Each structure stands twice: as C-alpha cells, then as structure tokens.
C-alpha cells in the first residue's frame, strides 16, 4: 500500500482507492491534484485534507452542516463536470466540507467555497458560490479564545 | 474608483490591449466579453478571494496543535445538507 510521510500526521498508509483527485487543484494550489481525507481519532469532527503531492500541505475542514444547520450546497454546471456528474447527486453521496482558517485572531470557516467530494468517483472540487448567502469567514464561536483576550 | 456607464454592445478599453464589452444585461446580471493578452489572467473575484482564503488556511503546526483546545459542540439533531443547481 502507498504511504506518505506528512508533517502533521506522521506516516499515513492508505489504499490507492482512497485517493481523491482534484482535476483543477484548489484555488491557490492549482498544481496540487491528489489528496487524502484523513481523520485523527482524538480530533473527532475535524477532517484533514492532506495533499499527496506536498507532504507539508494540509487543510483542516469540517462538514459544512455542522457549522451551519441545513446548509444548502449550490453546484454550478462546472462544479458538476469537475465531479464527473451530469445531474445533482444525492446529498449523502458527497462530502461538503468547509475549510477552516485558524490564526491568532481566532477561527473561521469558509462557507462560501466548500470543498465537495463525490464519494463514488472520488473526484473533488472547491465549489465557489456565486451568491453571498454564506460567509467566507464565518467566525467559529467554540474555538480557543483569541490571543490577547481573556486568559488567566 | 472610476465609474463609467455603458449600454449593451458598448466597450471599455484598458490600455492598448484589454477590451471589455457588455454583451447582455438581464435579470440583474451583466454578461461581459473580455479580450486580453494571454499573459494577463482574467478571473472572477470570488476565485481570487478563495485563493487568498486557502493560502491562509494551509495548516501550520501551531494551528494544528491548537485544535485540541477546541470544544466542538455535539449536534443535537442530525444536520443535513441539501443541494441545488446554480444557473451559471
């Protein structure tokens, strides 16, 4: 089985059929095409998107519906093509993951451009919304207190 | 910001090489045609914003280590995601 030595998670061994292919990469990382969805047992609801092209590159994500109840995912024709689909998939056939941004100011989630993975083909894309219904920097209330605030 | 009013089929030129034409105005949407040299990237602002957001989100070791201090609430009910089509 293939494996990769990652910065955050040590050695990950994975079956080749778990590879997720992003034909267009991700905006800002257009040349990174292959990723793994990795779970850390101690970090329950977080899902890590680990690049297989760059062992130092990973993102922390969380299912969008855990951040925004009844999240409505909107897919364009381009998004569907990236996922190898011609019509809308059943909701339980896709992962819809918000990328989290963690910094000293606190944590936020990008609900305006979720990572969408079609489980059957394991094709993925970042579905950038055309509307302004959800925020690209939705604050996460249950994160650690921002640096310089509170504390004892 | 420079503001210019244009009608359908009218064009704006930026420098010698860039041409933006209003092709269609319908239901609050404007369809633009853009001619620009190959070396000038043209993309929607949302893509540029997503690029910046992703670059800021690439996981650092300190951010990874901070995850253990998060207290993620349990979802009381099984939350759902629904899927719709966008017109573009």
Image (spheres, coloured by chain):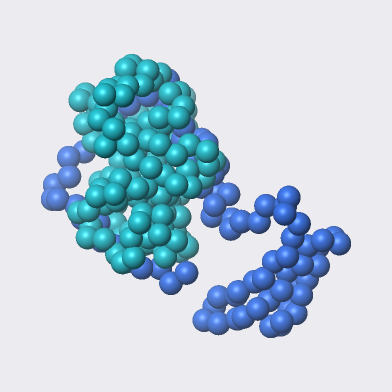
Chain colours: A cyan, B blue
Residue nearer the viewer, A28 or A101: A28
Residue found farthest to the left = B77
Which of the 4 quarters of the picture holds residue B82? bottom left
Residue B46, visible in the rendered structure? yes
On screen, residue A59 above or below A129: above
Q: Is residue A102 above or below residue B35?
A: above
Looking at the picture, how far across and down is residue B6, in whole percent? Answer: 73, 78
Q: From the image, which quarter does the N terminus of chain B lie in?
A: bottom right
Residue A107, position in %: x, y?
Answer: 40, 36
Q: Position of residue A68 (x, y in %)?
A: 29, 51
**Res. B3 visible in picture:** no
For the point 17% across and 40% down, which residue is it? Answer: B74
Looking at the image, which is closer to me, A124 or A2?
Answer: A2
- Residue at image location 41% in from the left, 49% down from the top: A125
**B47 left or right of B69?**
right
> Residue extending furthest right?
B16
Q: With A42 as the anchor, is A26 left or right in this view?
A: right
Q: Residue at horizontal 13%, vertical 47%?
A: B76
Residue at position x 26%, y 24% in the image: A1
Count up the numbered dots. 0
x and y percentages locating residue A139 in the rendered image? 39, 43
Q: Is residue A27 left or right of residue B10?
A: left
Q: Answer with the quarter of the image where residue B36 lies.
A: bottom right
Q: Is residue A122 left or right of residue B39?
A: left
């Amino acid at each position: 089985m293939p494996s990769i030595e990652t910065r955050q998670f040590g050695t990950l061994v994975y079956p080749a059929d778990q590879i997720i292919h992003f034909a267009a990469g991700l905006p800002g990382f257009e040349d990174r095409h292959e990723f793994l969805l990795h779970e850390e047992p101690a970090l329950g609801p977080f899902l890590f998107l680990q690049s297989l092209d760059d062992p130092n590159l990973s993102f922390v994500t969380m299912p969008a519906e855990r951040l925004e109840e009844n999240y409505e995912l909107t897919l364009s024709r381009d998004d569907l093509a990236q996922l190898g689909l011609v019509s809308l998939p059943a909701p339980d056939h896709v992962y819809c993951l918000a990328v989290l941004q963690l910094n000293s100011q606190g944590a936020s989630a990008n609900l305006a451009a979720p990572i969408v993975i079609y489980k059957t083909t394991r094709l993925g894309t970042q579905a950038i919304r055309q509307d302004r219904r959800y925020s690209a920097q939705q604050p996460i209330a249950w994160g650690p207190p921002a640096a310089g605030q509170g504390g004892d | 910001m420079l503001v210019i009013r244009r009608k359908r089929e009218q064009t704006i030129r930026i420098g010698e090489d860039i041409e933006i034409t209003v092709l269609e105005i319908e239901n609050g949407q404007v369809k633009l045609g853009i001619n620009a040299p190959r070396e000038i990237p043209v993309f929607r602002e949302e893509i540029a914003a997503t690029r910046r957001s992703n670059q800021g989100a690439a996981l650092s070791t300190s951010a990874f280590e901070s995850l253990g201090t998060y207290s993620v609430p349990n979802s009381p009910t099984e939350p759902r995601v629904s899927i719709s089509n966008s017109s573009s």
